[in-house]
């Protein structure tokens, strides 16, 4: 009887651990991955799909200008509700372009294209994503804004090599991307004015089919925090404002 009870207890513990891990996988997939990536995980497994690899990718970073003052002045419940709708809108746009959301940080979002599944057209997708973010998130931010607290979005896009893969423990998983391309996108985002999209020269060179309603304009070389040399940059202006 003791042996049987011990065996049943071990089976129960194992079953619970399995379902916890499966639940973590499902939550991870639903929250961060593009639908096609989640499908690949279901077919080939999380570890296979998300194993560490060095890939050529594009990174899109965005955040809200004026958000700190807005959050300090408005009721916290209203701020949280606004952030939820903001994240929902960005998640919908990211999924449309096959992007993997790497980080949410306050009002900032970092997205990867070309990882974990390699794609030859990641730069095109990144630029299309950035243009859609500017066009579709601006009305949402305008609906929150009050006269003395205007809100806008800055966007940075960069292309280059990064090492990507899952890091963490059994209790917490995170998809990490390491490389200067990630920092470059984040710094370009920091430098972008409200409503502006800035991208690096590598992304501009890699774009084969830009959106029909966009045009590229060269910017003066930029001094970005963490980079010893100036960075060549371009902005994307709407062709038909």
Image: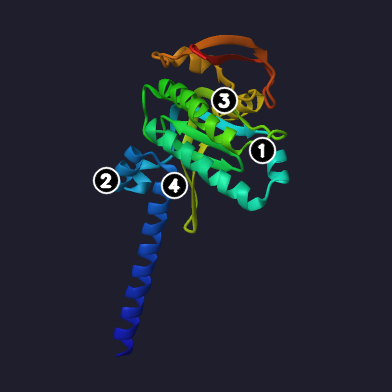
State which mark lies toward you, 3 or 1: 1
Q: Which residue matches tag 1?
A: 67
Which residue does the image show at 57% across and 44% down from the upper left?
82
Mark 2 Cα shell of 10 Å, populated few (<14), some (14-19), many (≥20): few
How far across and down, in percent of the image, does residue 141 sit?
58, 34
Label 2 vs 4, first from the N-terminus:
4
* Residue extending furthest toward the front: 147
Label 3 vs 2, first from the N-terminus:
2
**Real-space Cα distance between discs 3 and 1?**
17 Å
Q: Secondary structure at mark 3?
A: strand
Which residue does the image show at 43% across and 49% down from the upper left?
28
Q: Which residue matches tag 3?
A: 156
The reply, left or right, for residue 4 in relation to residue 217 is left
Q: Secondary structure at mark 1?
A: helix
Mark 3 Cα shell of 10 Å, populated few (<14), some (14-19), many (≥20): many
Q: Residue 13 sits in which quadrant?
A: bottom left
Q: How many marks?
A: 4
Q: Residue 229 sits in which quadrant?
A: top right
Q: Which residue matches tag 2?
A: 43
State which mark lies toward you, 4 or 1: 1
**Real-space Cα distance between discs 2 and 4?**
18 Å
Q: Out of 202 and 214, give the one closest to the viewer.
A: 214
State which mark lies toward you, 2 or 1: 1
The reply, left or right, for residue 241 in relation to residue 1 is right
**Real-space Cα distance between discs 3 and 2?**
33 Å
The reply, left or right, for residue 9 in relation to residue 58 is left
């Amino acid at each position: 009887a003791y042996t049987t009870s011990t065996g049943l207890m071990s089976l129960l513990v194992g079953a619970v651990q399995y379902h916890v891990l499966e639940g973590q996988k499902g939550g991870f997939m639903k929250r961060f991955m593009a639908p096609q990536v989640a499908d690949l995980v279901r077919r080939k497994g999380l570890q296979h799909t998300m194993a560490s690899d060095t890939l050529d990718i594009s990174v899109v970073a965005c955040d809200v200008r004026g958000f700190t003052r807005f959050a300090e002045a408005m009721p916290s419940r209203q701020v949280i509700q606004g952030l939820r709708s903001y994240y929902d809108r960005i998640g919908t746009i990211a999924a449309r372009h096959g992007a993997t959301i790497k980080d949410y940080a306050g009002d900032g979002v970092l997205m990867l294209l070309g990882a974990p599944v390699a794609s030859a057209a990641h730069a095109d997708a990144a630029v299309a994503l950035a243009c859609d973010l500017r066009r579709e998130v601006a009305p949402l931010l305008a609906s929150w804004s009050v006269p003395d607290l205007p809100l806008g979005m800055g966007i940075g896009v960069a292309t280059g090599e990064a090492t990507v893969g899952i890091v963490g423990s059994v209790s917490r998983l995170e998809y990490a991307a390491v490389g200067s391309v990630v920092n470059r996108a984040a710094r370009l985002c920091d430098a972008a004015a409200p409503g502006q999209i800035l991208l690096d020269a590598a992304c501009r060179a890699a774009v084969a089919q830009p959106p029909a309603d966009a045009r590229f304009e060269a910017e003066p070389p930029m001094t970005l925090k963490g980079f010893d040399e100036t960075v060549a940059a371009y902005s994307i202006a709407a062709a038909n404002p």
